[in-house]
Amino acid sequence: MAEKAVSKGFFVRDATGLVRELSWFDTFLAGFGILNVGLGLVQAFAYAPFVFPGGNIPIAFIIAIPGAFFLGLLNALFTAAMPRSGGDYVWVSRSINPLWGFAVNFFATFSVIAAAAVNIWYFDSIFLAPALHSIGLKGAASWIITNPAATLILAIPALIILVVIFSSGLQAVRKAMLGLFIVSAVGTLFWLGIMLFSNNAAFVNGFNGIMGAHAYQGLIDAAKTAGFGTSAATGGRNTFYAIVYAFQMYSGFQMIGYFAGEIKRVNKSAMQAIMTSLGIGAVMFVGGAFLILKYFGKDFVSAISFLNNTSPASTGLPLGNYLSSMVIFMTSNPILRAVVSIGFMATILWILLPQMLIITRNMFAWSFDRLMPQWLAKVNDRTHSPVNATITAAVLILIMLVITLTTSFWAYLVNLAGVGAVVGIVVSIAAIIFPYRRRDIFEKAPSIVQKKLLGLPLLVWSGIFTLLTQGVVGFICFTVPSIGGAVSWVSLLSSLSVFIVAFPLYAIIYAIIKKRGMDPSLAYKELPPE
């Protein structure tokens, strides 16, 4: 009893101050917002045809579904077993040890901060210009495309708005997510609808009508002249390798565990939200990928991807080289153009909300366990929002955006996906050993967590299959060209450093806490209070 009292006293306070306000549908909106079909299809076709020429992207999305399913199952069950803010920080720190828990979560948080910065860049440089162009503001669209400072100028008010929304509490966040989801869904469905009910000939006519006679074929020929080519002998292999991109695009639907401390009836809501997100997302990704090849043409999509990654200015396209920018060639109807373009703009804003939720709640969890300054865990009594963590998250995203815009930072971190697979392996191991190493927590978990198949808990099975999946993804990332470019010692070590730096950082924090007369290990003997 004495030890339990000490461990409870170790936390910043006896209650988090956070409130379980998110329904399963709110949770679905967050998970589906990160999965983000519209953005995912644009990103996948921007890079995969270039890195893995000749690969069949729709088939890659199909191959990746079982792995995504077990990843989702693992996260849903772990969330139900340990429903606290911090997600894998709590899971791994309680199942393996706090050092690995902090390292895994530190990498995950860094990755989300980096992704949020890139998404703001996408919003300003890729999605906003077509939207402005579609509503007649062609001068403003041109300014954004040609002015490198535009992204930074527009990012600051965007981040301020994010801080205001999150500081107002989860009710404001929920309303913003719902509104952006509706606008995004309408735009995405119209975009897919144009591709479904039209054909390649119509797109070719629209493209040539604006860009000039034979421009469509000319662009394909230009890519071939510049060195692009495919081989039937490598098509099957590259289709399999392209699952790296499929997993990257699926990723996000499972991330609700990071804010599990604010989900109502979490043991049921987590499973509902995760599996609904994956089910709808998988259908839309696979169907959307087939539609893109049918409508735009595989050679055209491959040529655009190649040129965009080698000499983007050579295409001469007025609104950029991404599929979301092709709406001006897809229809002459100004209303349809506006609906699709504004839908894409809403898509990129929507994803920023759950990303901010993840970043702030992870930092909150560290602070609550005294690994970071206690003021990060301070919660507003009226809004139940960690305002200090929110402001800190916005500042970190802005710093990362500046680094992204002004340095070759991403050239040295092209293999974050590979290191992410390594981190996934650690979480998988935690799932496999949790029922046995932390039987005290496992036996108190909801019945869904304790269910068994062939004598093993479902959580263990999900850990085993996720371990295998992450092993395959890691192998691909570290042995062939992957996300963003080719593997090199520089890129590999740069990416690994994000994970490795967490270990000495934790050691320093641990020593400081011990010097203050407290034993940090006591906090990890049980779950944090709610």
Image (cartoon, rainbow, N blue to C red):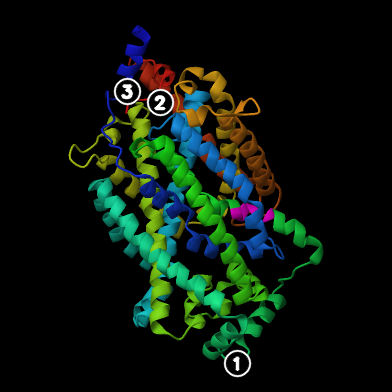
Is residue 148 at all visible to an observer of this figure?
Answer: no
The answer to whether the residue labelled 2 contacts the one labelled 1, judged by CB atoms less than 8 Å apart, is: no
The answer to whether the residue labelled 2 contacts the one labelled 3, judged by CB atoms less than 8 Å apart, is: no
Q: Quadrant of residue 470?
A: top right
Mark closest to the chain's N terminus, 2 or 1: 1
Residue 132 against residue 469 in the figure, above or below: below
Q: CA distance from mark 2 to mark 1?
A: 65 Å
Q: CA distance from mark 2 to mark 3?
A: 15 Å
Q: Residue furthest bottom?
A: 213
Q: Badge 1: few (under 14), some or many (20 or more) residues near its Cα, within 10 Å?
A: few
* Residue 510 picture location, percent across and down: 42, 22
| Amino acid type shown at disc 2 | Ile
448 inside magenta stretch:
no
Give the numbered dot on residue 213: 1
Q: Residue furthest left?
A: 382
* Residue 30 picture location, percent across and down: 40, 50
Q: Which residue is mark 2?
A: 509
Q: 159 or 501, which lies in front?
A: 159
* Residue 373 picture location, percent across and down: 31, 31
Q: Secondary structure at mark 3?
A: loop
Please tell me which residue is depicted at 59% across the width and 51% down the height of the picture: 247
Please tell me which residue is depicted at 56% across the width and 20% down the height of the picture: 436
Q: Main secondary structure of the magenta part?
A: helix
Q: Badge 2: few (under 14), some or many (20 or more) residues near its Cα, within 10 Å?
A: some
Please tell me which residue is depicted at 32% across the width and 18% down the height of the picture: 8
Q: Which residue is mark 3?
A: 11
Mark closest to the chain's N terminus, 3 or 1: 3
The magenta segment: 241-246
- In this picture, residue 444 sits left or right of residue 425: left
Q: CA distance from mark 3 to mark 1?
A: 69 Å
